Image (cartoon, rainbow, N blue to C red):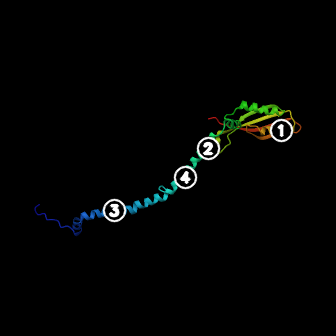
Amino acid sequence: MENQRPQKLSPFKLFLLQYFKIITPLVAILILVLGLFFILKPKYNEVKISGALNLEAKQEELAAKKLYLEQLISLRENYGSISEDDIAKIRGILPLEEDIPGLMAQFEKIVQGSGFNLSSLNISPAKNLFKNKGDEDVKKLLVVATIAGGDYSKFKDMLSVVESNLRLFDVRSINFTSGSDLYTLNISTYYLANK
């Protein structure tokens, strides 16, 4: 063991040992600069282009939300300005429930007021035919009424009364036979589903 000779270092190793304190910070700076240009800069540009940091897109979104808020405030003010009489009229046009007994009484009054007799009245719920979102709260009733006792001119007058009635009635079809005083009406009426 006494005969160990000192190893001779290669010139490259000697250079590294001699300038280690200078080379290490330069290599670290070089790695940081290359990482900035080849890793961080492309990611930054990608995020900027995609709009995550796009100030214009955020300002447009803010303007749209402010407009929506103004519309909501306007609607709330308009809602507050509706009188109780107007609300009662709207509920007469589109009731909050089926109100079949009220519908029967209303229809019988129209028929008898026009000089007819109500032979039969059938009221049944219809399938919900509305396909738009938000319309599923409006429900439909089908009314089939057979009336008798009047001539055609009285029948036309009765249809005018049905047309001008407060509750919304859609006459879907009319069936009658020439020379007969029997008329069959198929009518749709609507109400709001009570939640």
Q: Is residue 64 above or below residue 170?
A: below
Q: Position of residue 110 (x, y in %)?
A: 79, 34
Upstream in sequence: badge 2 or badge 1: 2
Q: Position of residue 101 (x, y in %)?
A: 72, 30
Residue underneath mark 3: 31
Residue underneath mark 2: 75
Which residue sits at x=49%, y=57%?
50
Residue underneath mark 4: 63
Q: Closer to the camera: disc 3 or disc 2?
A: 2
Mark 1 near mark 4, Cβ–Cβ under 8 Å? no
Asked whether, in this view, residue 8 is left or right of residue 25, the answer is: left
Q: Closer to the camera: disc 3 or disc 1?
A: 1
Which residue sits at x=83%, y=38%?
157
Q: Quadrant of residue 189?
A: top right
Callout 3 environment at 10 Å: few (<14), some (14 to 19), or many (20+)?
Answer: few
Q: Closer to the camera: disc 2 or disc 1?
A: 2
Q: Is residue 37 above or below residue 93?
A: below
Callout 1 environment at 10 Å: few (<14), some (14 to 19), or many (20+)?
Answer: few
Callout 4 environment at 10 Å: few (<14), some (14 to 19), or many (20+)?
Answer: few
Label 2 SS = helix
* Mark 1 residue type: Asp
* Mark 3 residue type: Ile
Label 1 SS = helix
The N terminus sits in image quarter: bottom left
* Mark 2 residue type: Leu
Q: Closer to the camera: disc 1 or disc 4?
A: 4
Asked whether, in this view, residue 53 is left or right of residue 126, the answer is: left
Looking at this view, name the residue that lies furthest to the right: 179
Res 157 label: 1
